[in-house]
Image: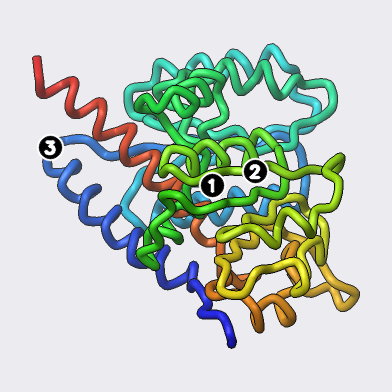
Amino acid sequence: MTAQRIDGIALSQKLRADVTLRTTALKAKGITPGLAVILVGENPASQVYVRNKVKACEDSGLHSILEKHPASLTEAALLNRIDALNHDTGIHGILVQLPLPAHIDAHKVIEAISPAKDVDGFHIASAGALMTSMPGFWPCTPYGCMKMLESIGYELKGKHAVVIGRSNIVGKPMALMLLQKNATVTICHSATQDLKAITLQADVIVAAVGKRNILTADMVKPGAVVLDVGMNRNEEGKLCGDVDFAGVEQVAGYITPVPGGVGPMTITMLLVNTLEAAERIQAIDFSV
């Protein structure tokens, strides 16, 4: 059996087309969704990420601004800039690209962003909303994973989902989203004993630790759905995930490739969150 590949590029294009339509409708009411992206320092990977995010906004009709600051920017200056953007009515989403220089407290920066503009879904208010199943912004990568499961019509109720990784960005919110869909969820991490015994029980596996080949074919139950969130490089410098793709593809029922899987969905869900932030403002403005 060869797994069906879940095409993140095709799905993201479909979702972005919907974003464009909804953005056009908002613009007709005088509101253009706006995203502010802040980059501090010269991290090459971060520069690529923010450039892709800004381009995605422009392609979908959203307004975006990219602010580049030197690595010497003080924490106080960054916090002041965020405060100004919080009060800017033309900006509906604020994203500060991580990692930040060592002298800046990333947690303090994230918490300075207004929860109403926290389109990355990292604010403690967003985390609390997800925990309690209240409206809020979901972190983009696990949100994208949920959309991928939805796209194949996968019913999570009663299924056993295993999340490998416990980060605040992917692992923990991923587990909570799966719980909301009534899956039975196990979170595995670096201290987990006998990972293989656990993954072999899984109907759905999300690999999100940033370690090549953490999941191999002998660890996967035939027919399982495997979502690979990893972003690594192999010996040839080619992009690869956390999953031994060639092997697992022969066992799984569905699998996401790297590249072309979860990656494109992350930026797409950022657009969705920014659009929804603007739509919420529109709803408030037009209800009074």
Using the image as rendered, state which of residue 99 and residue 145 is in the foreground: 145
Give coordinates of residue 126: x percent, y percent: 48, 25
For mark 2, give the secondary structure: strand
Residue marked by disc 3: 29
Above or below for 197 versus 276: below
Give coordinates of residue 251: x percent, y percent: 65, 79
Q: Quick one: label 1, few (<14), some, or many (20+) residues within 10 Å?
A: many
Residue found 62% across the figure and 75% down from its top: 222
Q: Quick one: label 2, few (<14), some, or many (20+) residues within 10 Å?
A: some
Q: CA distance from mark 1 to mark 3?
A: 31 Å
Foreground mark, 2 or 1, reads 2
**Which quadrant of the figure has residue 69?**
top right
Residue found 67% across the figure and 16% down from its top: 108
Using the image as rendered, state which of residue 207 and residue 18 is in the foreground: 207
Using the image as rendered, state which of residue 209 and residue 107 is in the foreground: 209
- Does 218 sit left or right of 128 as displayed? right
Report the quarter where the C terminus lies. top left
Name the amino acid type tagged 1: Pro
Name the amino acid type tagged 3: Lys
Structure colour scheme: rainbow
Instruction: Give the numbered dot on residue 186.
Output: 2
Q: Quick one: label 3, few (<14), some, or many (20+) residues within 10 Å?
A: few
- Does 130 sit left or right of 196 as displayed? left
Foreground mark, 1 or 3, reads 1
Foreground mark, 3 or 2, reads 2
